[in-house]
């Protein structure tokens, strides 16, 4: 009930914009393996080629390696 009430009071404007109009993109992902890390790096590179400013936050599961320390990261607590 409290959440519904808070959502009704929230007057923030939310909308989607077309990709071509977007100036910045945020990516949140968790590291599973080196292959996924490389796919994310390629995706980021393509976004930057398209002229987007990219901010990345990586979640790092316990006992997983943070490949290259390229992104801000937060360990996942289980």
Image (cartoon, rainbow, N blue to C red):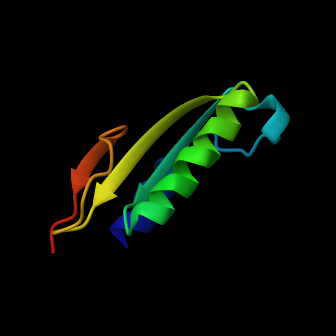
Q: Nearer the viewer, residue 61 or 37?
A: 37
Residue 17 % position (x, y) = 78, 40
Q: Position of residue 28 (x, y in %)?
A: 45, 52
Which quadrant is the C terminus positioned in? bottom left
Front one among 35 and 29: 35
Above or below 47: residue 59: below
Q: Is residue 71 visible to the viewer in this orientation of the structure?
A: yes
Q: As rendered, which of 12 and 71 lies closer to the eye?
A: 71
* Direction from residue 33 to residue 46 in the image, left or right: right
- What residue is at 37 percent from the left and 73 percent from the top? 1
Q: Residue at x 16, y 69 (%)?
A: 63
| Residue at the image position 23 percent from the left and 66 percent from the top | 64
**Residue 11 at least partly seen:** no
Q: Is residue 40 left or right of residue 31?
A: right
**Rendering coords of residue 18 (x, y %):** 83, 41
| Residue at image coords 53%, 46% | 41
């Amino acid at each position: 009930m409290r959440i519904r009430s808070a959502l009704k009071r929230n007057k923030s404007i939310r909308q989607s914009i077309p990709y071509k109009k977007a100036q910045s993109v945020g990516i949140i992902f968790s590291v599973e393996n080196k292959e996924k890390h490389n796919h994310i790096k390629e995706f980021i590179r393509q976004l930057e080629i398209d002229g987007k400013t990219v901010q990345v936050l990586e979640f790092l599961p316990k006992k997983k390696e943070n490949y290259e320390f390229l992104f801000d990261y937060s360990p996942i607590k289980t």
